[in-house]
Image: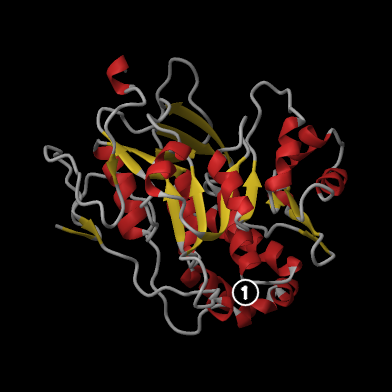
Amino acid sequence: MDTAEGRPGPDAAAHPTGPNAGSSDPSSTPWELGRVVGRGPAHDPMAAVRRPDDPPFDVFLSGTVFLDIIFTGLAGPPTSGTEIYTDGMGCSPGGVANLAIALSRLGLRTSLAAAFGHDVYGTFCRRTLEQQEDVDLTASREFPHWHSPVTVSLAYQADRSLITHAHEPPLSADEMIATSGLPRSRACFVDLGPEMEDWTRKAAAEGTRVFADVGWDPTEQWSQELLERLSSCYAFMPNTPEALAYTRTDTPEAALSKLGNLVPVAVVTRGSKGALAVDNETGEHADVPALPVEAMDATGAGDVFAAGFVTSTLSGWPLLHRLRFANLCAALSVQHFGGSLSAPGWADIAGWWQVAKRVPGLGDVAKDYAFLDEVVPHDPVGAVRRASATIGFQTDGVEP
């Protein structure tokens, strides 16, 4: 059973993490992971729009990193008093790591502020993000005596159930950033929780594009104060239930119309029905169906969609192409299990496109996605790694 020792106060010692922080791995851990091998050559979708005086990062974000343990191949959840066996299992960093990894795999220079526990789970998540997935952790911190949050996901019939155990981090993102400084970035991504963090307002005031989404309100009050906070945001990307609840409307189209009056870019996602969006800066509207795929695990699919939309927006694509690209990224991710590590890389996208152009009966899809010919890499790029069943192995893609 968890005890109070897992909840240090705000004065608890914190160790910086990141490339210049030095090693702070638990010396006694029996599961020393070694140095994780990087994923090889990357593709930069923003190469054509980069300038010498650009910020060092494309996207900055903050949040909680969980260790996700995902079970797949279930017919349904276990019933009371029973035990069931599953065909598949994967371990990966979760929470805000879903979005950070998805962004980095698409070639964006990504920086993350998060708390990491000084335990095996925290070491695994930190090393996966920093050394395998090239996510900058300069603004992150490692805390002794604070254990890593853990979520168990049961994936079945294109749905899932979650079980989570976690404590609040010893320091907030604002407190961590006060020490490290706010990384300069083109954009940032925030979850519009009960209160907007100070760093978000500062970033917006400095001209950073703020992309935002929102989680389910457990009180089901759907406070209108959240809509007032959109004044600092460039884009808002809720799903349909959230959009309807906060706008007090009955259809995704009506919700989008109302949200479009509050932010330059509004997107309403509709799960298996696709997404619709409006860009008030360009005058574009788009409504795109989802790609029909057989879903293995939907964990993190919304974050992968968001990563695809942010990437294509910062790259200057038309709205219709942005929505289609985001839908494609999400569709590719649900065909793998493992949450954050199910996110596609450019090798996955290029491979899908080569097949889509050749398969009979996919004429409309090939026509809709013809723009990919101009954006996918033409030279080989490194493949991404998928989730493994355990974090204990020392031989799979790891150097001692």
Left or right: where does residue 367 sit relative to residue 62? right
Q: Is residue 229 left or right of residue 153?
A: right
Residue at 78% from the left image edge and 55% from the top image edge: 276
Q: Secondary structure at mark 1?
A: helix
Name the outermost residue toward the left: 28
- Point out residue 336 in the picture as x, y percentages from the top left corner: 48, 54
Q: Is residue 339 visible?
A: no
Specify the quadrant of the image occupied by residue 94.
top left
Circle 1: residue type: Ala
Q: Is residue 68 above or below residue 8?
A: below
Whether residue 214 is situated above or below residue 127 in the rendered picture: above
Q: Which residue is mark 1?
A: 356
Location of the C terminus by quadrant is bottom left
Nearest the eye: 162 or 102: 102
Location of residue 231 by image quarter: top right
Q: Is residue 73 left or right of residue 257?
A: left
Determine which quarter of the picture holds residue 365: bottom right
Task: Give the x, y percent position of residue 359.
Answer: 63, 76
Number of marks present in the image shown? 1
Q: Is residue 43 above or below residue 258?
A: below
Q: Would you say residue 289 is visible in this rendering?
A: yes
Going 61% across and 45% down the picture, which residue do you hit?
201
